[in-house]
Each structure stands twice: as C-alpha cells, then as structure tokens.
Amino acid sequence: MRFQGKDTDLAHVLVAVVMGSDSDLPVMKDASDVLRYFDIRHEVRILSAHRTASSMFKYAQAAKKRGILVIIAGAGGAAHLPGMIAAITPIPVIGVPIKSSSLNGLDSLLSIVQMPPGVPVATMAINGARNAGILATQIVGTSHPEVSEKVNEYKNKLSKEIALKDLKLKNASPE
C-alpha cells in the first residue's frame, strides 16, 4: 500500500511502515494515519524477519537508495524485525512493540529496546504506533522545513487543547 502525498517536494516515499504480520496492521495503521495527516508519502509493507528474511534483507538494504528517510517497524513476540532492519540499513529505525497474547507486549518491548551497542532502534511504547508516526514526521522535518512547520502547528494545537481542558475543569470545579 502506498500513500501519495500532496506536496511535490515530497514526491517519493520518505517513510516505510513495516510489520511482521497482517495481524499487526490494526496497531500500525496509527502510524500511517499520522503520516497521512502530515502529507508524508509512505508505504506500508509486511516483511517478516523470520518467514521472509531474504525479502526483509533486500528491502532494508535498498531503503536508503530509494530515498526513504525513516523506517517504522512493528513486531510482536520475539520482535526481531526492527533490530534486523536496523542492523542492515544506516537510516533511523523506530520500533513499535506489538501487544502479544502471552506477555501483553512486554516480550516485544524488551526484544526491541535491548539492542546491542552500534545497532540502535528508537523504541516506542507497546502499541505506540501513533508516536512512531509523529517521531518519523519530526525526522523528515529535519530536511523538509514545510514538514517541520506542520509539526510545530500540530504541537501548538495540542497545547491549546490542553489549556482549554484545564480552563474548563477549573471553571467547573467548586471553590
């Protein structure tokens, strides 16, 4: 699946959203939704570190040449996908641990966060694909000022929403 961004300067795929299984899609969709909100052209793929190792390897090797700036990789259970991709490509990898049935995602979180020195993976919270999308957008924004400006607007909007909620609560509480 590919998303076509509106901005001509962002004409090629800048972010990859990959996962080990289609069962991860309900979580990883949040990353894609964020990227779509910011008009970041991206693609969504299923690449298993265990079941399609050769395809995953080729994909990670070619990512930089294709112009991809960030890879968001979601995985559950043993969660090797983010680390394996990070071992192959020099571009930033953001890992999203997917909640599993056996250990509620703690196994995935520990598998992704415990990377050896020299192979970093920025690790989100369990099922934290939304924050992964925001972090990927911020990384893209380091080389695309128009994206950085959209991120600033988004963060200002969040701040205003919280201030309004605080005011509403303050006005509703008896003194």
Image (cartoon, helix red, strand yellow):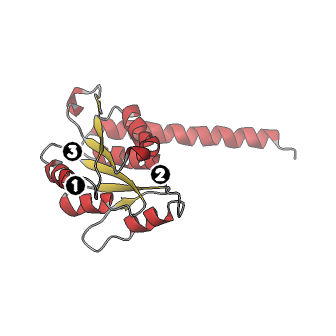
Q: At x 48% / y 52%, what residue is drawn?
A: 127
Image height of 134 relative to 101, above or below: above
Do the residues under discs 2 and 3 have CB atoms within 8 angstroms? no
Q: Quadrant of residue 169?
A: top right
The percent position of residue 63, horizontal first and vertical second, equals: 18, 48
**Three-letter residue code for mark 2:** Gly
* Left or right of 139 in this view: 167: right
The percent position of residue 134, horizontal first and vertical second, equals: 41, 45
**Three-letter residue code for mark 1:** Ile
Give the structural element (helix, strand or loop) at label 3: loop
Task: Indicate which disc, 2 or 3, sits on the residue closer to the N terminus.
Answer: 3
Q: Quadrant of residue 118?
A: bottom left
Residue projecting furthest to the right: 175
Do the residues under discs 3 and 1 have CB atoms within 8 angstroms? yes
Q: At x 18% / y 54%, what residue is drawn?
A: 54
Residue projecting furthest to the bottom: 117
On the image, numbered disc 3 is attached to which residue? 68
On the image, numbered disc 1 is attached to which residue? 91
Spatial CA distance of label 2 from label 3 is 21 Å
Give the quadrant of the N terminus: top left
On the image, numbered disc 2 is attached to which residue? 128
Do the residues under discs 2 and 1 have CB atoms within 8 angstroms? no
The percent position of residue 32, horizontal first and vertical second, equals: 38, 38
Give the structural element (helix, strand or loop) at label 1: loop
Q: Nearer the viewer, residue 70 or 8?
A: 70
Spatial CA distance of label 3 from label 1 is 8 Å
* Left or right of 35 in this view: 169: right
How many other residues sit within 10 Å of disc 2, few (<14), some (14-19) or many (≥20)? many
Task: Indicate which disc, 2 or 1, sits on the residue closer to the N terminus.
Answer: 1
Give the structural element (helix, strand or loop) at label 2: loop
